[in-house]
Amino acid sequence: MLFDSVKNIDGIQSSGEFKNEDSLSRVDPVSGGTQESKEGVSAVYEAKSQLINEYLQTEIGFGRYQWQLFVLTGLGWAADDIWLQGVAIILPQIENELRPVRVEYATMALYAGLILGASTWGVLADLIGRRLSFNITLFIAGVFGIAAGGANNFTTLAALIACLGFGVGGNLPVDGAIFLENIPQSHQWLLTLLSVWWALGQLLASLIAWPLIGNFSCASATDCTRADNMGWRYNFYTLGAITFLMWFLRYFVFNLQESPKYLLAKGRDEDALKVLEHIARVNGKVLSLTLDQLQTVSGEKRATGVPMSNLQIIKQSFSSFTLSHVKPLFSTRRLAINTSITIALWGLIGLAYPLFNGFITLYLTTHISDASSSVSTTYRNYVIISILGIPGSVIACLVVDWYRKDHSEKSMRDNRSGRRFMIGGRKLTMAVSTALTGIFLFLFTTSTKEADVLAYSCVTSLTQNAMYGVLYAYTPEVFPAPHRGTGDALCSAFNRMTGILAPAIKIVTTPVSGGASQTTANGPIFVAASLFLVSAILMLLLPIETAGKAAL
Protein backbone atom coordinates (compact mmCIF):
# COMPACT_ATOMS: atom_id res chain seq x y z
CA MET A 1 0.00 0.00 0.00
CA LEU A 2 1.51 3.27 -1.15
CA PHE A 3 -0.10 5.54 1.43
CA ASP A 4 -1.29 4.34 4.82
CA SER A 5 -4.45 6.12 5.93
CA VAL A 6 -4.80 4.54 9.32
CA LYS A 7 -2.13 6.80 10.79
CA ASN A 8 -3.16 9.86 12.71
CA ILE A 9 -2.61 12.33 9.87
CA ASP A 10 -4.50 15.52 9.06
CA GLY A 11 -7.77 14.65 10.73
CA ILE A 12 -7.82 10.88 10.06
CA GLN A 13 -7.98 8.91 13.27
CA SER A 14 -6.46 5.49 13.65
CA SER A 15 -9.93 3.93 13.37
CA GLY A 16 -10.35 5.47 9.93
CA GLU A 17 -12.94 7.99 11.13
CA PHE A 18 -13.05 11.60 10.09
CA LYS A 19 -12.44 14.31 12.66
CA ASN A 20 -14.98 17.12 12.71
CA GLU A 21 -12.45 19.90 12.28
CA ASP A 22 -14.48 22.19 10.04
CA SER A 23 -17.96 22.81 11.37
CA LEU A 24 -20.26 24.04 8.64
CA SER A 25 -23.99 24.51 8.24
CA ARG A 26 -25.70 21.57 6.57
CA VAL A 27 -28.86 20.85 4.70
CA ASP A 28 -30.47 17.44 5.15
CA PRO A 29 -30.41 15.89 1.67
CA VAL A 30 -33.39 13.68 2.50
CA SER A 31 -35.73 15.80 4.58
CA GLY A 32 -34.54 19.18 3.48
CA GLY A 33 -34.12 20.38 7.07
CA THR A 34 -30.99 22.22 8.12
CA GLN A 35 -28.61 21.05 10.81
CA GLU A 36 -25.25 22.27 12.02
CA SER A 37 -22.62 19.96 10.57
CA LYS A 38 -19.92 20.29 7.96
CA GLU A 39 -19.30 20.35 4.23
CA GLY A 40 -22.91 21.20 3.32
CA VAL A 41 -24.61 17.91 4.25
CA SER A 42 -26.78 16.74 7.14
CA ALA A 43 -25.40 15.39 10.40
CA VAL A 44 -27.40 12.20 9.77
CA TYR A 45 -25.73 11.63 6.43
CA GLU A 46 -22.30 12.53 7.80
CA ALA A 47 -22.51 9.96 10.60
CA LYS A 48 -23.56 7.21 8.20
CA SER A 49 -20.98 8.21 5.61
CA GLN A 50 -18.20 8.08 8.19
CA LEU A 51 -19.33 4.62 9.24
CA ILE A 52 -19.30 3.41 5.64
CA ASN A 53 -15.85 4.96 5.14
CA GLU A 54 -14.61 2.98 8.15
CA TYR A 55 -15.97 -0.32 6.83
CA LEU A 56 -14.64 0.41 3.33
CA GLN A 57 -11.24 0.89 4.91
CA THR A 58 -11.18 -1.94 7.43
CA GLU A 59 -13.33 -4.73 5.97
CA ILE A 60 -14.13 -4.26 2.28
CA GLY A 61 -10.79 -2.81 1.24
CA PHE A 62 -9.63 -2.21 -2.31
CA GLY A 63 -10.07 -5.32 -4.40
CA ARG A 64 -11.44 -6.79 -7.60
CA TYR A 65 -14.56 -4.60 -7.72
CA GLN A 66 -12.58 -1.37 -7.39
CA TRP A 67 -9.97 -2.43 -9.95
CA GLN A 68 -12.72 -3.18 -12.47
CA LEU A 69 -14.31 0.17 -11.67
CA PHE A 70 -10.92 1.88 -12.08
CA VAL A 71 -10.65 0.50 -15.61
CA LEU A 72 -14.23 1.25 -16.66
CA THR A 73 -14.34 4.78 -15.24
CA GLY A 74 -10.90 5.28 -16.78
CA LEU A 75 -12.31 4.33 -20.17
CA GLY A 76 -14.88 7.10 -19.74
CA TRP A 77 -12.12 9.63 -19.05
CA ALA A 78 -10.18 8.27 -22.01
CA ALA A 79 -13.25 8.75 -24.23
CA ASP A 80 -13.47 12.41 -23.20
CA ASP A 81 -9.97 13.18 -24.48
CA ILE A 82 -10.29 10.79 -27.43
CA TRP A 83 -13.01 13.01 -28.84
CA LEU A 84 -11.45 16.32 -27.79
CA GLN A 85 -8.31 15.30 -29.65
CA GLY A 86 -10.23 13.42 -32.33
CA VAL A 87 -11.90 16.64 -33.47
CA ALA A 88 -8.68 18.67 -33.15
CA ILE A 89 -6.79 16.10 -35.23
CA ILE A 90 -9.07 16.26 -38.26
CA LEU A 91 -9.34 20.06 -38.58
CA PRO A 92 -6.74 20.44 -41.36
CA GLN A 93 -8.37 17.68 -43.41
CA ILE A 94 -11.88 19.06 -42.90
CA GLU A 95 -10.64 22.45 -44.03
CA ASN A 96 -9.15 20.98 -47.20
CA GLU A 97 -12.20 18.92 -48.20
CA LEU A 98 -15.35 20.60 -46.87
CA ARG A 99 -14.11 24.21 -47.21
CA PRO A 100 -16.00 25.72 -44.24
CA VAL A 101 -15.95 29.46 -43.64
CA ARG A 102 -13.98 28.74 -40.45
CA VAL A 103 -12.97 25.22 -39.50
CA GLU A 104 -12.91 26.28 -35.83
CA TYR A 105 -16.71 26.04 -35.84
CA ALA A 106 -16.32 22.25 -35.55
CA THR A 107 -14.60 22.72 -32.19
CA MET A 108 -17.29 25.18 -31.18
CA ALA A 109 -19.98 22.61 -32.00
CA LEU A 110 -18.21 19.99 -29.87
CA TYR A 111 -18.10 22.35 -26.89
CA ALA A 112 -21.78 23.23 -27.29
CA GLY A 113 -22.56 19.54 -26.87
CA LEU A 114 -20.10 19.17 -23.99
CA ILE A 115 -21.75 22.05 -22.09
CA LEU A 116 -25.20 20.47 -22.33
CA GLY A 117 -23.85 17.00 -21.58
CA ALA A 118 -21.84 18.02 -18.51
CA SER A 119 -24.72 19.93 -16.93
CA THR A 120 -27.39 17.35 -17.81
CA TRP A 121 -25.65 14.14 -16.76
CA GLY A 122 -23.98 15.65 -13.70
CA VAL A 123 -27.24 17.01 -12.27
CA LEU A 124 -29.07 13.77 -13.13
CA ALA A 125 -26.43 11.87 -11.17
CA ASP A 126 -27.62 13.63 -7.99
CA LEU A 127 -31.31 13.40 -8.87
CA ILE A 128 -31.76 9.82 -10.09
CA GLY A 129 -28.39 8.21 -9.41
CA ARG A 130 -24.96 7.71 -10.92
CA ARG A 131 -25.78 4.43 -12.66
CA LEU A 132 -27.99 5.75 -15.49
CA SER A 133 -25.55 8.48 -16.50
CA PHE A 134 -22.63 6.04 -16.31
CA ASN A 135 -24.34 3.52 -18.58
CA ILE A 136 -25.72 5.78 -21.32
CA THR A 137 -23.14 8.49 -22.03
CA LEU A 138 -20.69 6.35 -24.03
CA PHE A 139 -23.54 4.81 -26.05
CA ILE A 140 -24.58 8.26 -27.28
CA ALA A 141 -20.98 9.25 -28.05
CA GLY A 142 -20.28 6.03 -29.96
CA VAL A 143 -23.38 6.20 -32.14
CA PHE A 144 -22.96 9.83 -33.15
CA GLY A 145 -19.19 9.47 -33.50
CA ILE A 146 -19.65 6.77 -36.14
CA ALA A 147 -22.40 8.79 -37.84
CA ALA A 148 -20.18 11.89 -38.00
CA GLY A 149 -17.69 9.99 -40.15
CA GLY A 150 -20.31 9.79 -42.89
CA ALA A 151 -21.16 13.52 -42.99
CA ASN A 152 -21.34 14.95 -46.52
CA ASN A 153 -21.05 18.61 -45.57
CA PHE A 154 -19.67 20.74 -42.78
CA THR A 155 -23.08 21.65 -41.28
CA THR A 156 -24.04 18.00 -40.85
CA LEU A 157 -20.62 17.19 -39.42
CA ALA A 158 -20.84 19.99 -36.85
CA ALA A 159 -24.34 18.91 -35.77
CA LEU A 160 -23.25 15.30 -35.27
CA ILE A 161 -20.13 16.39 -33.39
CA ALA A 162 -22.35 18.41 -31.03
CA CYS A 163 -24.48 15.31 -30.39
CA LEU A 164 -21.47 13.14 -29.58
CA GLY A 165 -20.26 15.93 -27.29
CA PHE A 166 -23.57 15.74 -25.40
CA GLY A 167 -22.87 12.08 -24.68
CA VAL A 168 -19.18 12.20 -23.84
CA GLY A 169 -19.61 15.40 -21.80
CA GLY A 170 -21.09 13.46 -18.90
CA ASN A 171 -18.07 11.26 -18.27
CA LEU A 172 -15.85 13.58 -16.24
CA PRO A 173 -18.45 14.73 -13.67
CA VAL A 174 -20.04 11.30 -13.23
CA ASP A 175 -17.21 8.77 -13.49
CA GLY A 176 -14.94 10.46 -10.95
CA ALA A 177 -17.80 10.61 -8.42
CA ILE A 178 -18.62 6.91 -8.89
CA PHE A 179 -15.02 5.84 -8.39
CA LEU A 180 -14.44 8.06 -5.35
CA GLU A 181 -17.60 6.83 -3.60
CA ASN A 182 -16.60 3.17 -3.86
CA ILE A 183 -13.00 3.22 -2.64
CA PRO A 184 -11.42 3.37 0.84
CA GLN A 185 -9.60 6.52 1.91
CA SER A 186 -6.24 4.76 1.70
CA HIS A 187 -6.67 4.52 -2.08
CA GLN A 188 -8.06 7.98 -2.87
CA TRP A 189 -4.71 8.76 -4.48
CA LEU A 190 -5.89 6.54 -7.34
CA LEU A 191 -8.37 9.26 -8.29
CA THR A 192 -5.35 11.27 -9.40
CA LEU A 193 -3.92 8.28 -11.25
CA LEU A 194 -7.28 7.91 -12.99
CA SER A 195 -6.24 10.88 -15.11
CA VAL A 196 -3.64 8.68 -16.81
CA TRP A 197 -6.57 7.30 -18.80
CA TRP A 198 -7.21 10.81 -20.10
CA ALA A 199 -3.62 10.95 -21.35
CA LEU A 200 -3.98 7.44 -22.80
CA GLY A 201 -7.07 8.65 -24.65
CA GLN A 202 -5.00 11.34 -26.33
CA LEU A 203 -2.30 8.79 -27.17
CA LEU A 204 -4.83 6.36 -28.64
CA ALA A 205 -6.39 9.11 -30.76
CA SER A 206 -2.97 10.12 -32.09
CA LEU A 207 -1.87 6.53 -32.79
CA ILE A 208 -5.04 5.87 -34.79
CA ALA A 209 -4.81 9.17 -36.67
CA TRP A 210 -1.16 8.79 -37.68
CA PRO A 211 -1.57 5.90 -40.16
CA LEU A 212 -5.13 6.73 -41.25
CA ILE A 213 -4.86 10.47 -41.81
CA GLY A 214 -1.18 10.25 -42.73
CA ASN A 215 -1.87 7.84 -45.62
CA PHE A 216 -5.41 8.68 -46.72
CA SER A 217 -5.49 12.48 -46.83
CA CYS A 218 -5.09 15.33 -49.28
CA ALA A 219 -1.79 17.16 -49.05
CA SER A 220 -3.52 20.48 -49.74
CA ALA A 221 -6.92 22.00 -50.51
CA THR A 222 -6.24 21.84 -54.24
CA ASP A 223 -8.58 19.27 -55.85
CA CYS A 224 -9.27 17.62 -52.46
CA THR A 225 -12.18 15.23 -53.02
CA ARG A 226 -13.88 12.87 -50.61
CA ALA A 227 -12.30 9.82 -52.26
CA ASP A 228 -8.82 11.28 -51.78
CA ASN A 229 -9.47 12.41 -48.20
CA MET A 230 -11.03 9.41 -46.43
CA GLY A 231 -8.49 9.38 -43.58
CA TRP A 232 -10.44 11.57 -41.18
CA ARG A 233 -13.60 9.53 -41.86
CA TYR A 234 -11.79 6.27 -41.15
CA ASN A 235 -10.51 7.93 -38.01
CA PHE A 236 -14.03 8.80 -36.81
CA TYR A 237 -15.37 5.34 -37.68
CA THR A 238 -12.59 3.77 -35.61
CA LEU A 239 -12.94 6.10 -32.62
CA GLY A 240 -16.73 5.66 -32.67
CA ALA A 241 -16.39 1.86 -32.72
CA ILE A 242 -13.92 1.96 -29.81
CA THR A 243 -16.28 4.18 -27.80
CA PHE A 244 -19.14 1.79 -28.55
CA LEU A 245 -17.00 -1.11 -27.30
CA MET A 246 -16.35 0.81 -24.08
CA TRP A 247 -20.11 1.15 -23.57
CA PHE A 248 -20.59 -2.58 -24.22
CA LEU A 249 -18.06 -3.45 -21.51
CA ARG A 250 -19.77 -1.09 -19.06
CA TYR A 251 -23.32 -2.22 -19.72
CA PHE A 252 -23.06 -5.94 -20.44
CA VAL A 253 -19.83 -7.12 -18.79
CA PHE A 254 -19.49 -5.19 -15.53
CA ASN A 255 -22.25 -5.37 -12.91
CA LEU A 256 -22.16 -1.77 -11.72
CA GLN A 257 -23.92 -1.09 -8.43
CA GLU A 258 -25.44 2.26 -7.54
CA SER A 259 -23.25 4.44 -5.35
CA PRO A 260 -23.83 3.54 -1.67
CA LYS A 261 -23.36 7.17 -0.64
CA TYR A 262 -25.96 8.34 -3.16
CA LEU A 263 -28.37 5.78 -1.68
CA LEU A 264 -27.60 7.04 1.84
CA ALA A 265 -28.32 10.59 0.76
CA LYS A 266 -31.72 9.45 -0.52
CA GLY A 267 -32.52 7.66 2.75
CA ARG A 268 -32.24 4.20 1.16
CA ASP A 269 -30.10 2.63 3.89
CA GLU A 270 -31.10 -0.97 3.15
CA ASP A 271 -30.18 -0.60 -0.54
CA ALA A 272 -26.84 1.00 0.41
CA LEU A 273 -26.06 -1.94 2.68
CA LYS A 274 -26.87 -4.43 -0.11
CA VAL A 275 -24.44 -2.60 -2.41
CA LEU A 276 -21.69 -2.76 0.21
CA GLU A 277 -22.35 -6.48 0.72
CA HIS A 278 -22.07 -7.02 -3.04
CA ILE A 279 -18.76 -5.15 -3.23
CA ALA A 280 -17.40 -7.13 -0.27
CA ARG A 281 -18.52 -10.39 -1.89
CA VAL A 282 -16.79 -9.54 -5.20
CA ASN A 283 -13.64 -8.71 -3.22
CA GLY A 284 -13.82 -12.03 -1.39
CA LYS A 285 -14.61 -10.38 1.93
CA VAL A 286 -17.44 -10.63 4.47
CA LEU A 287 -19.13 -7.44 5.67
CA SER A 288 -20.17 -7.38 9.33
CA LEU A 289 -22.04 -4.06 9.12
CA THR A 290 -25.78 -4.42 9.80
CA LEU A 291 -28.74 -2.21 8.99
CA ASP A 292 -29.33 -1.56 12.69
CA GLN A 293 -25.75 -0.33 13.09
CA LEU A 294 -26.09 1.93 10.07
CA GLN A 295 -29.33 3.46 11.31
CA THR A 296 -28.35 3.60 14.98
CA VAL A 297 -25.11 5.52 14.39
CA SER A 298 -27.12 8.61 13.44
CA GLY A 299 -29.69 8.19 16.22
CA GLU A 300 -32.59 7.67 13.83
CA LYS A 301 -34.45 4.79 12.26
CA ARG A 302 -36.13 4.87 8.85
CA ALA A 303 -38.77 2.60 7.40
CA THR A 304 -37.36 0.51 4.61
CA GLY A 305 -40.36 1.01 2.34
CA VAL A 306 -41.08 -0.61 -1.01
CA PRO A 307 -38.31 -0.43 -3.67
CA MET A 308 -39.12 2.06 -6.44
CA SER A 309 -38.66 1.52 -10.15
CA ASN A 310 -36.35 3.76 -12.21
CA LEU A 311 -39.38 5.59 -13.63
CA GLN A 312 -40.75 6.26 -10.14
CA ILE A 313 -37.37 7.54 -8.98
CA ILE A 314 -37.17 9.90 -11.98
CA LYS A 315 -40.71 11.22 -11.42
CA GLN A 316 -40.11 11.77 -7.69
CA SER A 317 -36.77 13.50 -8.30
CA PHE A 318 -38.09 15.96 -10.85
CA SER A 319 -41.32 16.65 -8.95
CA SER A 320 -39.23 17.98 -6.04
CA PHE A 321 -36.44 19.55 -8.10
CA THR A 322 -35.05 22.67 -6.41
CA LEU A 323 -31.68 24.24 -5.81
CA SER A 324 -31.25 21.93 -2.80
CA HIS A 325 -28.09 20.44 -4.35
CA VAL A 326 -26.60 23.84 -5.20
CA LYS A 327 -27.15 25.87 -2.01
CA PRO A 328 -25.19 23.50 0.29
CA LEU A 329 -22.10 24.08 -1.86
CA PHE A 330 -22.20 27.72 -0.67
CA SER A 331 -23.59 27.11 2.83
CA THR A 332 -20.74 28.82 4.72
CA ARG A 333 -18.25 31.54 3.89
CA ARG A 334 -15.33 29.09 3.73
CA LEU A 335 -17.16 26.58 1.58
CA ALA A 336 -18.57 29.31 -0.66
CA ILE A 337 -15.08 30.72 -1.29
CA ASN A 338 -13.70 27.27 -2.04
CA THR A 339 -16.57 26.35 -4.36
CA SER A 340 -16.35 29.69 -6.19
CA ILE A 341 -12.60 29.42 -6.74
CA THR A 342 -12.91 25.78 -7.85
CA ILE A 343 -15.57 26.66 -10.43
CA ALA A 344 -13.49 29.65 -11.57
CA LEU A 345 -10.45 27.39 -12.01
CA TRP A 346 -12.39 25.00 -14.18
CA GLY A 347 -13.56 27.94 -16.26
CA LEU A 348 -10.11 29.50 -16.71
CA ILE A 349 -8.46 26.18 -17.54
CA GLY A 350 -11.41 25.25 -19.73
CA LEU A 351 -10.54 28.23 -21.92
CA ALA A 352 -6.77 27.93 -21.70
CA TYR A 353 -6.51 24.22 -22.56
CA PRO A 354 -8.34 24.20 -25.93
CA LEU A 355 -6.68 27.45 -27.04
CA PHE A 356 -3.54 25.37 -27.44
CA ASN A 357 -4.55 21.72 -27.52
CA GLY A 358 -7.74 22.18 -29.52
CA PHE A 359 -5.71 23.37 -32.50
CA ILE A 360 -2.39 21.65 -31.87
CA THR A 361 -2.20 19.97 -35.29
CA LEU A 362 -2.72 23.37 -36.88
CA TYR A 363 0.11 24.81 -34.77
CA LEU A 364 2.38 21.89 -35.65
CA THR A 365 1.87 22.57 -39.35
CA THR A 366 2.05 26.38 -39.29
CA HIS A 367 4.55 27.21 -36.52
CA ILE A 368 7.66 25.81 -38.18
CA SER A 369 9.55 28.16 -40.49
CA ASP A 370 12.64 26.09 -41.26
CA ALA A 371 10.92 23.08 -42.82
CA SER A 372 7.73 22.06 -44.51
CA SER A 373 6.49 19.05 -42.54
CA SER A 374 4.48 16.36 -44.28
CA VAL A 375 1.10 15.21 -42.97
CA SER A 376 2.71 12.01 -41.68
CA THR A 377 5.46 13.96 -39.85
CA THR A 378 2.87 16.19 -38.18
CA TYR A 379 0.97 13.21 -36.78
CA ARG A 380 4.18 11.44 -35.80
CA ASN A 381 5.10 14.47 -33.70
CA TYR A 382 1.61 14.46 -32.23
CA VAL A 383 2.08 10.85 -31.12
CA ILE A 384 5.35 11.79 -29.40
CA ILE A 385 3.62 14.67 -27.59
CA SER A 386 0.83 12.33 -26.46
CA ILE A 387 3.31 9.79 -25.08
CA LEU A 388 5.10 12.45 -23.03
CA GLY A 389 1.82 13.45 -21.40
CA ILE A 390 1.38 10.09 -19.63
CA PRO A 391 4.21 10.50 -17.05
CA GLY A 392 2.58 13.76 -15.95
CA SER A 393 -0.36 11.88 -14.42
CA VAL A 394 1.98 9.43 -12.70
CA ILE A 395 4.17 12.20 -11.25
CA ALA A 396 1.10 14.02 -9.91
CA CYS A 397 -0.13 10.80 -8.33
CA LEU A 398 3.16 10.33 -6.48
CA VAL A 399 3.33 13.92 -5.22
CA VAL A 400 -0.23 14.67 -4.05
CA ASP A 401 0.11 12.62 -0.84
CA TRP A 402 3.83 13.08 -0.28
CA TYR A 403 4.75 13.26 3.41
CA ARG A 404 7.93 13.76 5.37
CA LYS A 405 8.61 13.12 9.04
CA ASP A 406 9.25 16.02 11.39
CA HIS A 407 12.13 15.05 13.69
CA SER A 408 12.19 18.34 15.56
CA GLU A 409 12.70 18.29 19.32
CA LYS A 410 9.08 19.30 20.03
CA SER A 411 7.69 16.71 17.64
CA MET A 412 9.82 13.98 19.16
CA ARG A 413 8.62 14.95 22.64
CA ASP A 414 4.98 14.76 21.53
CA ASN A 415 5.40 11.59 19.48
CA ARG A 416 8.48 9.43 19.58
CA SER A 417 8.15 8.33 15.99
CA GLY A 418 7.87 11.89 14.75
CA ARG A 419 4.82 13.51 13.17
CA ARG A 420 4.32 13.35 9.41
CA PHE A 421 3.88 16.61 7.51
CA MET A 422 2.59 16.97 3.98
CA ILE A 423 5.03 18.58 1.57
CA GLY A 424 3.05 17.88 -1.58
CA GLY A 425 -0.71 18.05 -1.34
CA ARG A 426 -3.38 18.80 -3.91
CA LYS A 427 -3.13 22.59 -3.91
CA LEU A 428 0.65 22.93 -4.19
CA THR A 429 0.95 20.20 -6.85
CA MET A 430 -1.81 21.82 -8.91
CA ALA A 431 -0.31 25.28 -8.61
CA VAL A 432 3.23 24.26 -9.58
CA SER A 433 2.19 22.14 -12.57
CA THR A 434 -0.22 24.83 -13.79
CA ALA A 435 2.41 27.58 -13.52
CA LEU A 436 4.93 25.45 -15.42
CA THR A 437 2.36 24.88 -18.16
CA GLY A 438 1.93 28.63 -18.60
CA ILE A 439 5.70 29.21 -18.66
CA PHE A 440 6.32 26.52 -21.27
CA LEU A 441 3.53 27.89 -23.46
CA PHE A 442 5.17 31.32 -23.40
CA LEU A 443 8.41 29.64 -24.46
CA PHE A 444 6.55 27.80 -27.22
CA THR A 445 5.66 31.13 -28.84
CA THR A 446 9.39 31.86 -29.28
CA SER A 447 10.11 28.64 -31.20
CA THR A 448 10.23 28.38 -34.98
CA LYS A 449 12.38 25.27 -35.50
CA GLU A 450 10.79 21.82 -35.54
CA ALA A 451 12.90 20.51 -32.64
CA ASP A 452 11.99 23.48 -30.42
CA VAL A 453 8.29 23.26 -31.26
CA LEU A 454 8.27 19.55 -30.45
CA ALA A 455 10.26 19.97 -27.22
CA TYR A 456 8.05 22.70 -25.75
CA SER A 457 4.91 20.84 -26.83
CA CYS A 458 6.14 17.71 -25.03
CA VAL A 459 6.94 19.38 -21.70
CA THR A 460 3.66 21.30 -21.87
CA SER A 461 1.83 18.02 -22.38
CA LEU A 462 3.54 16.56 -19.30
CA THR A 463 2.82 19.47 -16.96
CA GLN A 464 -0.78 20.01 -18.05
CA ASN A 465 -1.60 16.32 -17.58
CA ALA A 466 -0.16 16.57 -14.06
CA MET A 467 -2.32 19.65 -13.47
CA TYR A 468 -5.49 18.00 -14.74
CA GLY A 469 -4.76 14.84 -12.79
CA VAL A 470 -4.82 16.67 -9.47
CA LEU A 471 -7.74 18.93 -10.42
CA TYR A 472 -9.80 15.88 -11.39
CA ALA A 473 -9.07 14.36 -7.96
CA TYR A 474 -9.52 17.51 -5.89
CA THR A 475 -12.90 18.51 -7.32
CA PRO A 476 -15.00 15.44 -6.40
CA GLU A 477 -13.13 15.12 -3.09
CA VAL A 478 -14.06 18.62 -1.96
CA PHE A 479 -17.79 18.11 -2.64
CA PRO A 480 -19.81 15.76 -0.36
CA ALA A 481 -21.59 12.81 -2.01
CA PRO A 482 -25.20 14.12 -1.78
CA HIS A 483 -24.22 17.15 -3.88
CA ARG A 484 -21.10 15.80 -5.61
CA GLY A 485 -22.76 15.26 -8.98
CA THR A 486 -24.14 18.80 -9.00
CA GLY A 487 -20.85 20.32 -7.88
CA ASP A 488 -18.94 18.38 -10.52
CA ALA A 489 -21.57 19.34 -13.09
CA LEU A 490 -21.20 23.05 -12.30
CA CYS A 491 -17.44 22.82 -12.67
CA SER A 492 -17.53 20.74 -15.84
CA ALA A 493 -20.28 22.82 -17.45
CA PHE A 494 -18.43 26.08 -16.72
CA ASN A 495 -15.29 24.44 -18.10
CA ARG A 496 -17.11 23.72 -21.36
CA MET A 497 -18.82 27.12 -21.44
CA THR A 498 -15.51 28.95 -21.41
CA GLY A 499 -14.02 26.34 -23.74
CA ILE A 500 -16.51 27.32 -26.43
CA LEU A 501 -14.85 30.74 -26.46
CA ALA A 502 -11.55 29.20 -27.60
CA PRO A 503 -12.61 28.83 -31.25
CA ALA A 504 -13.95 32.40 -31.19
CA ILE A 505 -10.62 33.73 -29.88
CA LYS A 506 -8.76 31.65 -32.46
CA ILE A 507 -10.97 33.06 -35.24
CA VAL A 508 -10.51 36.67 -34.09
CA THR A 509 -6.75 36.46 -33.62
CA THR A 510 -5.91 34.37 -36.70
CA PRO A 511 -6.96 35.61 -40.16
CA VAL A 512 -8.34 33.20 -42.76
CA SER A 513 -5.48 33.84 -45.15
CA GLY A 514 -2.02 32.48 -44.52
CA GLY A 515 -0.49 35.92 -44.20
CA ALA A 516 -0.75 36.17 -40.43
CA SER A 517 2.29 37.44 -38.62
CA GLN A 518 3.97 35.29 -36.00
CA THR A 519 2.65 37.57 -33.24
CA THR A 520 -0.91 37.25 -34.53
CA ALA A 521 -0.59 33.47 -34.88
CA ASN A 522 0.67 33.29 -31.30
CA GLY A 523 -2.26 35.31 -29.97
CA PRO A 524 -4.32 32.34 -28.69
CA ILE A 525 -1.23 30.78 -27.09
CA PHE A 526 -0.39 34.03 -25.26
CA VAL A 527 -3.93 34.08 -23.86
CA ALA A 528 -3.70 30.42 -22.82
CA ALA A 529 -0.35 30.89 -21.06
CA SER A 530 -1.63 33.93 -19.14
CA LEU A 531 -4.76 32.08 -18.00
CA PHE A 532 -2.68 29.15 -16.72
CA LEU A 533 -0.53 31.51 -14.62
CA VAL A 534 -3.61 33.24 -13.16
CA SER A 535 -5.08 29.81 -12.34
CA ALA A 536 -1.89 28.81 -10.52
CA ILE A 537 -2.24 31.81 -8.20
CA LEU A 538 -5.91 31.03 -7.50
CA MET A 539 -5.05 27.43 -6.60
CA LEU A 540 -2.89 28.63 -3.74
CA LEU A 541 -5.86 30.63 -2.41
CA LEU A 542 -8.14 27.61 -2.05
CA PRO A 543 -9.03 27.38 1.67
CA ILE A 544 -9.63 23.61 1.72
CA GLU A 545 -6.94 20.95 1.29
CA THR A 546 -8.34 17.43 0.70
CA ALA A 547 -5.11 15.41 0.85
CA GLY A 548 -5.07 12.82 3.64
CA LYS A 549 -8.82 13.13 4.30
CA ALA A 550 -11.58 10.63 3.61
CA ALA A 551 -14.22 11.96 1.22
CA LEU A 552 -17.76 12.20 2.61
Image (cartoon, helix red, strand yellow):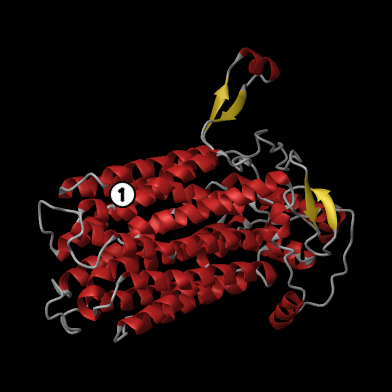
**Residue 8 versus residue 196 in the image, above or below:** above
As drawn, is 513 to the left or to the right of 348? left
The outermost residue toward the left is: 371
Residue at left offset 56%, top offset 70% = 134
Percent coordinates x, y for residue 464 in the rendering: 39, 48
Front position in the image: 476 or 117:
117
For the N terminus, the quadrant is: top right
Circle 1: is it few (<14), some (14-19), or many (20+) Cα within 10 Å?
A: some
Residue at left offset 63%, top offset 68% = 123
Q: Which residue is mark 1?
A: 388
As drawn, is 340 to the left or to the right of 440? right
Task: Name the amino acid type tagged 1.
Answer: Leu
**Residue 94 versus residue 448 in the image, above or below:** below
Q: Secondary structure at mark 1?
A: helix
Front position in the image: 200 or 21:
21
Dividing the picture into quadrants, the one containing residue 365 is: bottom left
Percent coordinates x, y for residue 540 in the rendering: 54, 38
**Residue 434 versus residue 42 in the image, above or below:** above
Front position in the image: 234 or 156:
156
Query: Can see residue 141?
Result: yes
As drawn, is 220 to the left or to the right of 27? left
Percent coordinates x, y for residue 157 in the rendering: 35, 81
Dividing the picture into quadrants, the one containing residue 149 is: bottom left
Residue at left offset 28%, top offset 42% = 443
Dividing the picture into quadrants, the one containing residue 88 is: bottom left
As drawn, is 143 to the left or to the right of 445? right
The outermost residue toward the bottom is: 152
**Residue 168 versus residue 534 in the image, above or below:** below
Residue at left offset 74%, top offset 39% = 19
